[in-house]
Each structure stands twice: as structure tokens, then as C-alpha cells.
Image: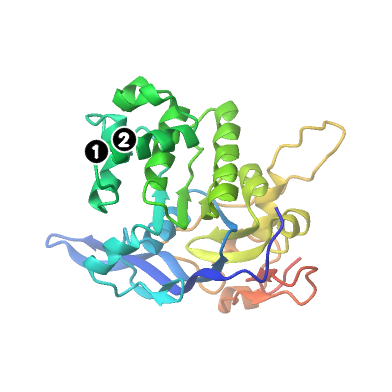
Amino acid sequence: MSLTLGAEVILSVRNLVKSYPVRGGLLSREIGSVQAVSNVSFEIRKGETFGLVGESGCGKSTLGRTILRLTEASSGQIYFKGQDITALGQSDLRKLRRQMQMIFQDPYASLNPRMTVESIIGEPLDIHRLCRSKAERRERIFNLLDRCGLRREAISRYPHEFSGGQRQRICIARALAVEPEFIVCDEPVSALDVSIQAQIVNLMQDLQKDLGLTYLFIAHDLKVVQHISNRVAVMYLGKIVETATADELYLRPKHPYSQALLSAIPIADPSRKRERIVLKGDIPSPLRPPSGCYFHPRCSRSREKCQLEGPQLENDAASQDGVHAISCHYPG
């Protein structure tokens, strides 16, 4: 997908940290902390899809929830349309919810099984008082069902009566009910069959085009991210190690971790071969992260500097599009 560099920055994350205390002992005293998100900074422009990839447990979902203040940040700033939202009170935060929504990973767990589709989609309309009558409310729900590819008779049914893909469509309709500008998509297709994944991704692209939506798209499926994203950030152990346009990252990855991830993507054409990069060792414990560069224990290029000094995320002067940044002392 092409990237509009001149578009307005709708979300800016600066030096964001989210840590969790670790308690132990007889009195459950705090004995340490885990940094799920470690000094992360990036920007998302209006109308784009910013992909976020990495292994399970690297902090992707925590970052998404922290941006929406479903989880409170430990430090750093989050700017939405130029406003610092990290210190907003509950009243102002509720107003902000109209503009920022989330689609969760598991459509089975994110829908109340005791509520009908009408109640599920209508709840945000009621909370924000967006309808003046029951007739207007129902018509708005019908329109959302139509837009998300669901039959109108679904309005009186319960979540257990739908397939996984249909439930995710209900979740999307619920997120769209308040007419948001920005949506965090937390692995929205990972719990679905492959054949259904393409339908949901295509729906999300159509909605983005029609409604001018901006997405933070979190996923571990690199092919899906490549298909839907304008730019992609690669995350490792709570840190962003590389950002670039989707085309640039997938054609010319510079960070050794990004190269290893991309080497694992299956190739449909058996005549083409790709060298598989197998990382040594396991992901380090976030409770006791390595010194220097977090990736150095698993990196084939690791040198003494990597063990002593953590690299900064810096722009690559040789990149062809001018937006490629790498956090590595010895990028490839």
C-alpha cells in the first residue's frame, strides 16, 4: 500500500514505557519489574495502516492497550491529534473513546454471550447518547450490519449462534458504531480460519477507504501485515528495532531480527528458495533482559559493543524512501 508522507500525524507516541511490578516472598514485596513496553516512540499518519509485528510476548498487545489507556502507561506521552491524552481525566477520556476504538483478538471472548447483537452494537450508541429515538438507534444498527456484511435478522440473535468470522464482523460493527477515526486492531484475524482471514482483512480495507479510518494493526502473521500495512514496525522484547514502509521492510530488512522473521515466511512457488535464518537460543526473560542490545545473545553479528551499549532507533541514510529506521550497531 502506498504511503502519503504529507498526511497529518494523528497519533504520536513518545518514549512510552509500561512496566509491571514483580512480587515475591512471604509478604509479597516488590522484588523487581518487567518492562512490557520499553521507551517506544513512533507516529501514525491519518488514513494509513501502521503494522506492528513480533514474536508472542514481545509487548505488542500491551502497547496497543496502553495507547488507548485501557492500561495506564508508566511514563511517556501519547498525543492524539496533537493533544496529550496520558493525563486526561475520566470525563475527557470518555469523550475521546468516540474517536479511538479497539478490535480485540478473540471474537469469542470479547462479546457478552448474554447480549443480543442489537444490545452489543447499541451499547456504545447508548453510552455516548448518539441516537434520539429507538427507531433511529435500530436503523443505525441495521446500517452497521449492512456495512459489515451481516444480515439484518442477526439483530435478535446471540453470539453463540454465529461463526468466528461473523463474530469478528459484529466486533467491527461495534467499534464503528461511534464513528471513530483511529482503531487499534489487536490480531483481529489470528483466531480465524485462513479462508475467513482474507474476508475480514478485505472488509477492513474497504471500511478504511470508505470511512477514512486509521489503523494500528497488530499481528504475528507477516503476510497479512505486508498486505494491509503502509508502514511496519518490528518489536522485540518491548522495543521497536526497525520501522519502514511495508515494501522496503519486506524487500530490504536491515535488522538481523527482522531478517530472521521474514525468512520464515513460506513461499508458494517451489522453484524459489529462501535461506532460512534460525535464531539461536530462546527469547530472554523480560524480568532480566540482556545488557546492551536486547537481541545480542541470539544475533550472529553480535560484537563487544552490542553487549555493552544499547543501540538507538535511527534513520537509515541509505534507505530509498527516507523513512527506514533501525536500532542496530551493525545493520545488514
Query: Is residue 121 visible to us here?
Result: yes
Q: Is residue 301 left or right of residue 31?
A: right
Tell me the quarter of the picture where residue 34 sits.
bottom left
Q: Is residue 325 left or right of residue 185?
A: right
Q: Residues within 10 Å of mark 1 (few under 14, many from 20)?
A: few
Alpha carbon distance from label 1 to label 2: 6 Å
Q: Report x, y in % for residue 161.
A: 35, 20
Instruction: Check disc 2 and give the amino acid type.
Output: Arg
**Mark 1 sits on what residue?**
134
Instruction: Check disc 1 and give the amino acid type.
Output: Lys
**Mark 2 sits on what residue?**
138
Q: Report x, y in % for residue 234.
A: 59, 59
Q: Residues within 10 Å of mark 2 (few under 14, many from 20)?
A: some
Q: Which residue is at 39% across, 35% downward?
A: 107
Q: Which residue is at 71% across, 65% downward?
A: 301
Q: Nearer the viewer, residue 275 or 272?
A: 272
